[in-house]
Image (cartoon, helix red, strand yellow):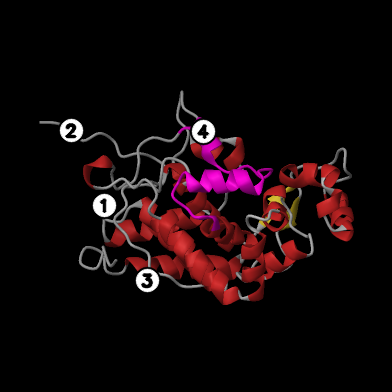
């Protein structure tokens, strides 16, 4: 905590100011900034590898199919630009991602939590590594195993899934649910989604639908939607259908404050996945490219 207290004391103020301005112009960016941090940490740890551009001979994480819809890069770049002008070479892009996600959640109405800093930026980013991200069709048992392999409890997993209280998903992520999961999909929502995606057997896979009816507000509505089988993704609805997780969904739906607390715990764990510290990483000058090699004399 307060890692930059001496070296760049304005860090958190700058991050919050830029995020606040961005959300004022586009409230949907709250979901984008939260997702950027999650997709960063779940692949090679929280090292800002998701921000690196592809190079000749290497397709980076950001250009993998799983990450094509990520957004908010320009917000991170703006924060970095200001921080570099104030404290050159001090604040890592990985820390910026963690702080921006926290502020996005808070400014969207969610909980505020302290973010420990001191992460270093990685130097490797490979699209193939994004297979580590949870797919939208996974069932609860598989999600429990996947998150458990990173040290998360079942409650952590359900709480972090509640991050879907913000944002939208593309038709490609839930089209199969419309076609094959009628028993666990509210009929009126199924009809609406079918229309959005241009019919069950064709249409526009780039169209989107919101995860819940308050998709720019961080609240407990996501869990209430699951209770009436209005979960958008298979990996959302399975949390209510599975006996392993149904009780947690019901608890979070009944008590949003409990969800907020559990989400904080999950985010603190996630923000410390496989950290690079000391000489294991660098502080990038620009978040989209690794630093040039230092000359040796």
Say whether disc 3 or disc 1 marks the residue closer to the N-terminus. 3
Disc ID at residue 127: 4
Tell me, yes or no, whether the two marked residues, 1 and 2, touch with CB atoms within 8 Å.
Answer: no
Q: Nearer the viewer, residue 140 or 289?
A: 140
Inter-mark Cα distance, 4 to 3: 33 Å
Q: Quadrant of residue 25?
A: bottom right
Identify the magenta region: 126-154
Place of residue 141 in the rendered image (x, y in percent of width and height, measured from the top left): 62, 46
Question: Would residue 81 appear left or right of 24 to someone viewing this image?
Answer: left
Say whether disc 4 or disc 3 marks the residue closer to the N-terminus. 3
Where, quadrant-wise, is the C terminus in this rendering? Answer: top left
Say whether disc 4 or disc 1 marks the residue closer to the N-terminus. 1
Look at discs 2 and 4 and give the one toward the viewer.
4
Disc ID at residue 13: 3
Most extreme residue toward the top is 57
Inter-mark Cα distance, 2 to 3: 34 Å
Q: Is residue 166 visible?
A: no
Inter-mark Cα distance, 1 to 2: 17 Å
Q: Quadrant of residue 209?
A: bottom right
């Amino acid at each position: 905590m307060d890692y930059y207290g001496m070296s760049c004391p304005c860090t958190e103020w700058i991050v919050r100011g830029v995020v606040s301005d961005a959300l004022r112009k586009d409230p949907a960016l709250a979901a984008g900034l939260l997702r950027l941090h999650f997709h960063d940490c779940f692949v090679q740890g929280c090292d800002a590898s998701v921000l690196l551009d592809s190079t000749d001979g290497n397709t980076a994480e950001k250009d993998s199919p799983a990450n094509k819809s990520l957004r908010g890069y320009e917000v991170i770049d703006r924060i970095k630009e200001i921080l570099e002008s104030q404290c050159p070479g001090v604040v890592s892009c990985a820390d910026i991602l963690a702080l921006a996600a926290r502020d996005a959640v808070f400014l969207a109405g969610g909980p505020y939590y302290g973010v420990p800093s001191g992460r270093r930026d990685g130097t490797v980013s490979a699209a193939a590594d994004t297979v580590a991200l949870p797919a939208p069709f996974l069932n609860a048992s598989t999600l429990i195993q996947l998150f458990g392999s990173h040290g998360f409890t079942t409650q952590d997993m359900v709480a972090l899934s509640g991050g879907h209280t913000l944002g939208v998903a593309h038709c490609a992520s839930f089209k199969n649910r419309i076609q094959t999961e009628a028993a666990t999909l509210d009929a009126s929502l199924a009809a609406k989604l079918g229309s959005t995606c241009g019919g069950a057997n064709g249409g526009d896979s780039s169209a989107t639908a919101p995860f819940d009816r308050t998709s720019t507000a961080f609240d407990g509505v996501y869990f209430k939607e699951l209770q009436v089988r209005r979960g958008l993704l298979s990996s959302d609805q399975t949390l209510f259908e599975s006996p392993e997780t149904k009780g947690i969904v019901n608890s979070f739906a009944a008590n949003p404050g409990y969800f907020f607390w559990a989400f904080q715990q999950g985010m603190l764990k996630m923000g410390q996945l496989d950290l690079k510290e000391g000489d294991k990483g660098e502080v990038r000058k620009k978040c989209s490219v690794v630093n040039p090699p230092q000359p040796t004399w």
